[in-house]
């Protein structure tokens, strides 16, 4: 009976010292705002993104301080309720009077650090007129067009969602959105245009779920503790039976 009690005590000790509770998954979100770095088509840094709006009434909930292109008309009607905190952005220093809007291209980049193993990730995006998403230099997908006006209209009216799960790694991840404006003919103007005539913008947001690293090592890393405890209990048992 005492031998059984000794074995039970050792087993209980192993459970107490060796059990590791499963780590709870955590999430990180990201959204288009003024924290995103911007480079031009020649990879020259332009600073950080700025908020942009077509005009005072479009899109809805234009953020305070955003640059208005003073565009005559409406648009950018994509429902952003699923990507909290996301707003339409473009390169800094641009307003409605800025020329060479046609086919202008900018890259918006940000680093996302995951302190654990990625489980699931996605990004939703709308663009005027075309955008590509990259994660760690891997092309995730594209939305819109600079050659088909109907596709570009779709891209600014609806969010497109992509999975980024296969491209995520533990630690540093680089998310890049390469956005390009359409040609002047999309605005009914052949040749070059300014941004009042041919506005441009992109909006996006997403999240990543990851499993944090376990803070307590697995039981197999404690052989010394278990052996020492077993010897101690055995000696104590022998002493009681002397």
Image: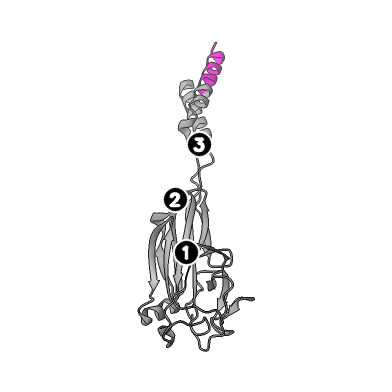
Q: Give the labeled residue for mark 3.
A: 217
In magenta stretch: residue 237: yes
Q: Is residue 192 above or below residue 109?
A: below
Task: Residue 238 in the image: state x and y as whole percent.
Answer: 53, 14
The Cα atoms of the two marked residues, 2 and 3, are separated by 22 Å
Taking the image as shown, residue 70 lies to the left or right of residue 175, namely right
- Give the SS element for disc 1: loop
Q: Residue 143's quadrant in the figure?
A: bottom left
Query: Residue 57: image x %, image y %?
Result: 57, 85
How many numbered badges does the structure rendering display?
Answer: 3
Disc 1 packing (10 Å; few <14; some 14–19; many ≥20): few
In space, the residues marked 1 and 2 are separated at their CA atoms by: 28 Å
Q: Earlier in the sequence, mark 3 or mark 1?
A: 1
In the displayed structure, would residue 212 be above or below residue 79? above
| Label 3 to label 1: alpha-carbon separation | 48 Å
Badge nearest the viewer, 3 or 1: 1
Residue ID for mark 1: 42
Mark 3: which secondary structure? loop
- Is disc 2 in contact with disc 3, using a CB cutoff of under 8 Å? no
Q: Is residue 5 above or below residue 95?
A: above
Split into 4 quadrants, where in the image is the C terminus?
top right
Residue in the picture at 60% in, 77% down? 67
**Is residue 41 in the magenta section?**
no
For marks 1 and 2, the one nearer the N-term is 1
Instruction: Sort mark 3 into few (<14), some (14-19) or many (20+) by Cα contacts within 10 Å.
Output: few
Above or below, 17 against 29 in this view is: above
Majority SS type along the magenta span = helix
Q: Nearer the viewer, residue 109 or 203?
A: 109
Q: Which residue is mark 2?
A: 169
Q: Nearer the viewer, mark 1 or mark 2?
A: 1
* Of callouts 2 and 3, the N-terminal one: 2
Region of the chain picked out in magenta, as a range: 230-242
């Amino acid at each position: 009976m005492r031998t059984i009690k000794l074995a039970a005590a050792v087993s209980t000790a192993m459970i107490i010292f060796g059990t590791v509770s499963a780590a709870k998954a955590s999430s990180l979100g990201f959204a288009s705002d003024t924290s995103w770095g911007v480079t031009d088509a020649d990879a020259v840094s332009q600073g950080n993104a700025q908020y942009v709006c077509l005009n005072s009434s479009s899109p809805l909930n234009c953020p305070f301080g955003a640059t208005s292109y003073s565009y005559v008309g409406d648009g950018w009607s994509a429902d952003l309720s699923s990507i909290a905190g996301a707003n339409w952005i473009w390169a800094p220093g641009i307003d409605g009077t800025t020329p060479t809007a046609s086919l202008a291209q900018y890259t918006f980049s940000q680093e996302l650090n995951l302190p654990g193993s990625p489980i699931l990730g996605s990004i939703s995006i709308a663009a005027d007129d075309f955008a590509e998403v990259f994660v760690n230099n891997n092309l995730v997908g594209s939305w819109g067009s600079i050659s088909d006006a109907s596709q570009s209209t779709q891209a600014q009216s609806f969010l497109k969602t992509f999975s980024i799960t296969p491209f995520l790694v533990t630690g540093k991840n680089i998310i890049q959105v390469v956005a390009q404006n359409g040609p002047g003919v999309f605005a009914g103007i052949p040749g070059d245009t300014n941004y009042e005539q041919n506005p441009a913008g992109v909006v996006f947001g997403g999240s990543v779920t990851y499993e944090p690293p376990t803070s307590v090592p697995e039981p197999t890393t404690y052989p010394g503790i278990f052996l020492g405890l077993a010897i101690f209990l055995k000696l104590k048992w022998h002493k009681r039976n002397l």
